[in-house]
Each structure stands twice: as structure tokens, then as C-alpha cells.
Image (tube, rainbow, N blue to C red):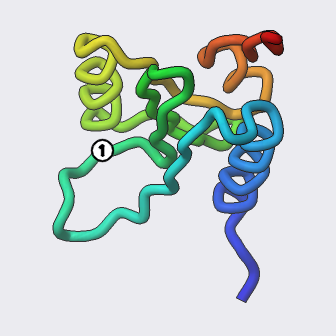
Amino acid sequence: MSKKPESKRQQRLARAIKARYGDDVFLYKVHGNAYQPSGIPDHVGVVYGLFFGLEVKEPNGELSAVQQTRIRQIRRAGGIAGAVVTEEDVFELLPPIRPETT
């Protein structure tokens, strides 16, 4: 069975995040089920002490009302959250990489 386009996009974006931040990021792919609240973003994580939630969408995809609510809740609590389609979208939301310190 082949993967859906959105699943491939999620994997591609996760690889890009890990490549950019390396050991400075904790990234978790959320696999929704009946035991968790609905609308949790596809990827959640922490980079440089900042919590983030990324809802991965196809180019013409739209956020559901509950996804919009979860994104607002994360932002209100001080986290970073949003819908992303491309790597550029991801890196507009997440902070720049830290320069090496010696």
C-alpha cells in the first residue's frame, strides 16, 4: 500500500527539521487515536526550549475548526504553531539555528 501524499510530506518535513536542528530538537509525530484530544498538530516538539506544533497540509488543504482552536491554544500558551505545506513554511515559524559557540 502506497503512502498518502500528506504522509510523504510529513516525513519530508520531519527530515528537514532534524537535518537543520540536529540534536537541538525533540520532534514527535502524533498518530491520532480515540484516546487523545482531537486537533493535535501532526508534529509537536521542542527546539531551544520552545514548544511547537505543526499541522501539515497539502497545498489546497484547509484547517478544521478544531485544528484552528488547537493552534490558537498553543500560541496563547506561548508556543509556536501553524499550518505548514513546505520547508519554507516550517522555517518561517521555527527559530533560526543557533550559531556555534566556542
Q: Which residue is mark 1?
A: 39
Residue 58 in the image, given as x and y percentages of width and height: 66, 43
Q: Quadrant of residue 57?
A: top right
Which residue in the rendered view is the most extreme toward the front? Answer: 102
Q: Quadrant of the N terminus?
A: bottom right
Q: Residue at x 68, y 41 (%)?
A: 23
Q: Residues within 10 Å of mark 1 (few under 14, many from 20)?
A: some
Q: Which quarter of the figure is the C terminus placed in?
A: top right
Residue at left offset 41%, top offset 27%: 51
Q: Residue at x 30, y 23 (%)?
A: 74
Left or right of 94 on screen, residue 3: right
Percent coordinates x, y for residue 42 in the rendering: 48, 48
For image coordinates 77% across by 49% down, the residue present is 15
**Helix, strand or loop at disc 1?**
loop
Query: 99 or 63: nearer the eye?
Result: 99
Residue nearest the observer in this picture, 24 or 62: 24
Left or right: 11 with respect to 41? right
From this viewpoint, which residue is outermost toward the bottom?
1
- 86 in relation to 96, above or below: below
Determine the image quadrant of residue 64. Answer: top left
Question: Can you say whether 41 is above or below 76 in the image?
Answer: below
Disc 1 residue type?
Gly
